[in-house]
Image (tube, rainbow, N blue to C red):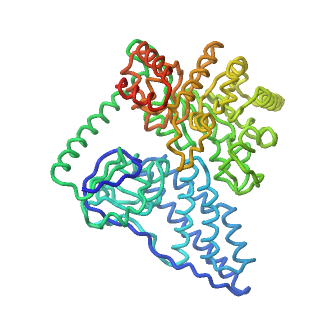
């Protein structure tokens, strides 16, 4: 029995036959058009856009009925993409000045825009490339007179295997017939994966060559928890998985019972359990899992999903919506963290040998105060509608923090002069993600209102290991004693000054790490919405005093392997 391994993106187990899904083939001609044909090609393109918008609107309505308002907002975003002036301008420019036919012009534009997003380090932004591709491919189908592919009329219950599934295909698939799906590309934050979790359909993504390896019609077991696929399982394996499926359903029911329970240890230690989000639409999942707040709201989506720097009003509307939806629960909003591998189609970054150490985040904001002030004013205005905290990324010096506070005070003065209400005592903290911030934590703690530890970058910078480099990925470990000691230094420095410390990096949701971080004294865990109940269960199953002993012992160990082995022996 052969076993394949992908990325588990939606939990659950399914057994069934394989159905290979293929997108319709579209011929993209490269013929140069005559100057007199540009108007005809322009009209063809604009007509296809209008037809696509009508189709997307129909899908949005159906999705709202079947999956709820939040899921339907994916397609409102798709309508925005279809109407994106930057995309339209690029296509029409290629038609009118380069004399390309409408299909070729759109295809090249799609590739250019998707490449920008796919270069991002953050998985959330890489997955947004699929949304752009989804919309553009729909327009291409309409240009070619090809009916966009669907999974609406399947003859039997199947496990769908595809290169990737667009949100529109996922939203319209036959829920009674699709037992699970497997894709060759994509990540956990892709809309198709998010929708699979909403529909509670098992999903595995990122399994390269899946279509080639899985013969159509063959029986497989798809395990969305582990990302494993078992080909042609024998009766004993099937029986074992059926039993495991029952156990998982029981565990899910147990987790749901924790919805209204507090994240408090058995001996009474309480922590805050919050969630990370990338856009306002993610709030629904946070509330559905009773998250106590937003520990990290990445604001980059507003900038990367736009054809220009977003206005104060656009930002204010987004921040206000999240703060209002959270109804008094704390919302920590990180200021613009662009640069490095996160680029903008409308801004030219300097050419750098190492952009991760270059012109990015707070450095860029302080260098372009008007851009920064636009965001700070929007944040201040939104603070009048709930509990909003501001977090600054990539801070390495007190000078940077103080400079940002000066600009914030300027914004407060401007709003006061206009009689615009805001939280006069708004909290401002920093994201601790560099060794410099760790080593200066005792000084920062005297001036900031809070810390939030970003373990992804802190691990990368502490160990000098590029977390996106597969060649050295084995060296990247937040269990490295240097990283653990850095985390403890930050927590202790903050507590000496009576300040709270959160963690918004992936490490906060690592099941083995939760008791360790609890014992270190972490005040707030901020994880994905889907991990909230699982982390809560771990916290509630531990004694704080036992966790403290665990942390003290782990911090005495000398290698990452020793730490992981030790925790594996001790954690529940």
Question: Outermost residue, left direction?
Answer: 235
Residue 232 seen in the current view: yes
- Residues 265 and 291: in front is 265
Vertical placement of residue 24 versus 418, above or below: below
Q: Residue at x 39, y 26 (%)?
A: 538
- Counting from the top left corner in percent of width and height, residue 483 is at 56, 29
Q: Is 91 situated above or below 4?
A: below
Residue 468 in percent (x, y) is at 57, 48
Residue 286 located left or right of residue 372:
left
**Count of residue discs:** 0
Using the image, determine if residue 123 lies above or below residue 132. Answer: above
Residue at position x 57%, y 43% in the image = 278
Give left or right: position of 121 versus 348.
Answer: left
Q: Nearer the viewer, residue 495 or 99?
A: 495
Position of residue 423 measured from the top left corner of the image (x, y, whole percent): 70, 25
The quadrant in which the C terminus is found is: top left
Residue depicted at 38% across the width and 61% down the height: 210
Q: Residue at x 28, y 56 (%)?
A: 2
**Where is residue 473 drawn, in percent x and y?**
52, 45
Asked whether residue 412 appears in the rendered view, the answer is no
Q: Is residue 567 above or below residue 465?
A: above
């Amino acid at each position: 029995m052969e076993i394949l391994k992908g990325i588990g993106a939606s939990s659950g187990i399914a057994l069934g036959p394989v159905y290979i899904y293929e997108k319709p083939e579209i011929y993209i001609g490269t013929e140069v058009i005559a100057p007199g044909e540009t108007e005809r090609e322009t009209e063809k393109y604009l007509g296809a856009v209008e037809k696509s918008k009508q189709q997307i609107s129909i899908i949005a309505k159906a999705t709202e009925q079947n999956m709820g308002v939040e899921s339907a907002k994916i397609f409102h975003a798709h309508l925005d993409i279809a109407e994106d002036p930057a995309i339209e301008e690029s296509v029409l420019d290629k038609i009118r000045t380069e004399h390309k036919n409408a299909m070729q012009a759109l295809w090249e534009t799609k590739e250019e825009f998707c490449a920008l997003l796919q270069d991002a380090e953050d998985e959330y932004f890489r997955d947004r490339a699929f949304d752009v591709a989804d919309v553009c491919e729909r327009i291409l189908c309409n240009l070619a007179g090809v009916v966009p592919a669907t999974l609406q009329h399947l003859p039997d219950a199947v496990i769908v295997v595809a290169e990737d599934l667009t949100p529109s295909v996922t939203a319209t698939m036959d829920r009674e017939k699709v037992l699970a799906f497997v894709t060759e590309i994509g990540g956990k934050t892709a809309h198709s994966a998010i929708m699979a979790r909403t529909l509670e359909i098992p999903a595995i993504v990122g399994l390269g060559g899946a279509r080639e390896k899985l013969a159509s019609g063959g029986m497989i077991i798809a395990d969305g928890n582990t990302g494993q696929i078992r080909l042609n399982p024998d009766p004993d394996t099937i029986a074992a998985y059926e039993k495991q499926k029952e156990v998982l359903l029981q565990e899910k029911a147990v987790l749901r019972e924790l919805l209204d329970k507090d994240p408090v240890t058995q001996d009474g230690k309480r922590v805050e359990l919050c969630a990370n989000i990338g856009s306002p639409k993610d709030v629904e999942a946070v509330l559905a899992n009773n998250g106590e707040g937003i520990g990290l709201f990445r604001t980059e989506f507003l900038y990367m999903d736009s054809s220009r720097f977003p206005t104060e009003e656009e930002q204010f509307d987004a921040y206000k919506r999240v703060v209002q939806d959270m109804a008094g629960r704390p919302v920590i909003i990180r200021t613009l963290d662009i640069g490095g591998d996160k680029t903008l189609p409308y801004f030219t970054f300097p050419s750098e040998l190492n952009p991760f150490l270059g012109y990015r985040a707070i450095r860029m904001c302080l260098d372009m105060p008007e851009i920064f002030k636009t965001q700070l004013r929007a944040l201040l205005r939104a603070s009048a509608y709930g509990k909003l905290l501001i977090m600054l990324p990539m801070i390495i010096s007190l000078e940077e923090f103080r400079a940002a506070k000066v600009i914030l005070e300027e914004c407060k003065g401007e709003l006061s002069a206009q009689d615009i209400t805001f939280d006069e005592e708004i909290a401002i903290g920093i994201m601790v993600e560099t060794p410099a911030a760790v080593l200066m934590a005792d000084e920062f703690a005297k001036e900031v209102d809070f810390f939030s530890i970003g373990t992804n970058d802190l691990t990368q910078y502490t160990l000098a290991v590029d977390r996106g480099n597969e060649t050295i990925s084995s060296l990247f470990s937040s269990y490295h004693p240097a990283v653990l000691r850095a985390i403890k230094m930050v927590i202790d420095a903050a507590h000496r000054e009576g300040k709270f410390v959160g963690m918004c990096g992936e490490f906060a949701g690592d099941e083995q790490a939760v008791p360790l971080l609890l014992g270190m004294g972490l005040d707030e865990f901020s994880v994905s919405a889907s991990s909230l109940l699982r982390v809560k269960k771990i916290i509630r199953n531990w004694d704080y005093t036992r966790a403290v002993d665990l942390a003290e012992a782990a911090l005495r160990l000398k290698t990452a392997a020793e730490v992981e082995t030790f925790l594996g022996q001790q954690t529940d």
